[in-house]
Amino acid sequence: MIAVLKPNTSPEQREHLINWLKTMVTDVHISEGKAYTVLGLVGDTSRIDPELLESLDIVESVQRVSEPYKKCSRQFHPEDTVVEVGKAKIGAEFCLIAGPCSVETEAQIIDVAERVKAAGADVLRGGAFKPRTSPYDFQGLKGEGLRLLSEAKKVTGLPLVSEIMSIDTLDLFEDVDIIQVGARNMQNFDLLKELGHLDRPILLKRGLAGTLKELLMSAEYIMAGGNEKIILCERGIRTYETMTRNTLDLSAVPVLQERTHLPVIVDPSHATGLSRLVPPMALAAAAAGADGIMVEVHNDPAHALCDGAQSLTPEQFADLSSRVRKILEAMKA
Ligand code: PEP
Ligand code: MN
């Protein structure tokens, strides 16, 4: 961390500040310029609040040299993390996650699972605990939904991803291969801390108004507890635009990949809210270098209990899957 002092700082004020800083860091390097003095703080700066330091009368500005997210930072872990789930190696090979927004019936989930598998999906998604804006909307089949997902896994062999909303329901997720933290819970720190104690992959979605730094800090919460199997997901953020459900921030993919070794996938379904917009944004995500996509697929979108408007049919998903492969091939060339 670097602190620049204001030109009119007296030697006593400077001395006082340096002595205080030395109680928290290993050393303070002083470089004197004509007008400004620059203090270089050496060692662990985690006990220093940069905003507090910058608020002092004699401090002009404060800059961090390293980021506050350590475990998920590429700085200290240059090689990509690969999260293995079933046959999928997320972070090493492109991963296709597909399935309905919500599990509705046994026939529905098994039909969708079989058809997305045939189209090349690596992981089956399906919500059982649904975070709905209205309490009167379908809230998910909960434990029964997870049981039906298990049936679909038995039939197809596809690993599962499903969203958790409360740690109290963790026992029900025994057969779920990847536990999803939804956008609304990105900063549910108590939940993140609990998931940090598991030895199970976590799919962490970006919050509706979450910055990339906040997303990385949330991943850090999970990693700080010991669980390093995290997949990040860009799913669109809330902006002033109303023609799409959210605004897909595709630059999040290369930006996150620069900053972190964790895999980064894209959810074009919640990002756009409209099924016809899903294929172009899914292809763009693959072209941007995402490690995978998560797409909502329903066998009868018109009658879906949740998010029918953004759900692809299995046929549309099969078409998308083969087009994604072509993008990936083209990118190898
Ligand atoms: C979901 O993937 O089922 C979901 C609710 O998405 P998000 O948390 O991104 O809104
Ligand atoms: Mn949905």
Image (tube, helix red, strand yellow):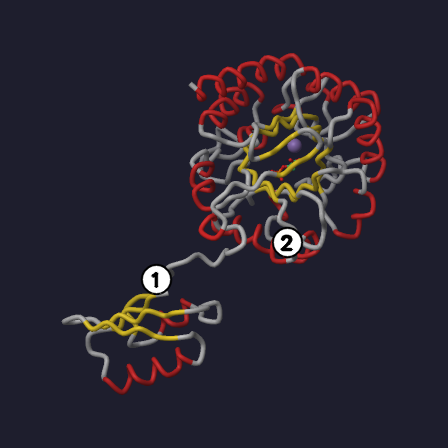
Taking depth in this image into account, of 182 and 230 the one nearest to the observer is 230
- Which disc is residue 63 wearing? 1
Q: CA distance from mark 1 to mark 2?
A: 28 Å
Taking depth in this image into account, of 127 and 47 the one nearest to the observer is 47
Residue 214 in picture, x, y percent from top left: 51, 51
Q: Is residue 84 above or below residue 325?
A: below
The residue where tag 2 is placed is 188
Quadrant assignment for the C terminus? top left
Residue 90 in picture, x, y percent from top left: 60, 34
Taking depth in this image into account, of 81 and 159 the one nearest to the observer is 81
| Residue at left offset 20%, top offset 73% | 32
Q: Is residue 39 left or right of residue 109?
A: left
Residue 177 in picture, x, y percent from top left: 73, 38
Q: Amino acid at mark 1?
A: Gln
| Residue at left offset 63%, top offset 14% | 318
Quadrant containing ligand 1: top right
Q: Look at the numbered disc 2 and give the secondary structure of its residue.
A: loop
Query: Which picture quadrant has residue 33?
Result: bottom left
Upstream in sequence: badge 1 or badge 2: 1
Q: Look at the numbered disc 1 and give the secondary structure of its residue.
A: strand
Residue 156 in picture, x, y percent from top left: 78, 22
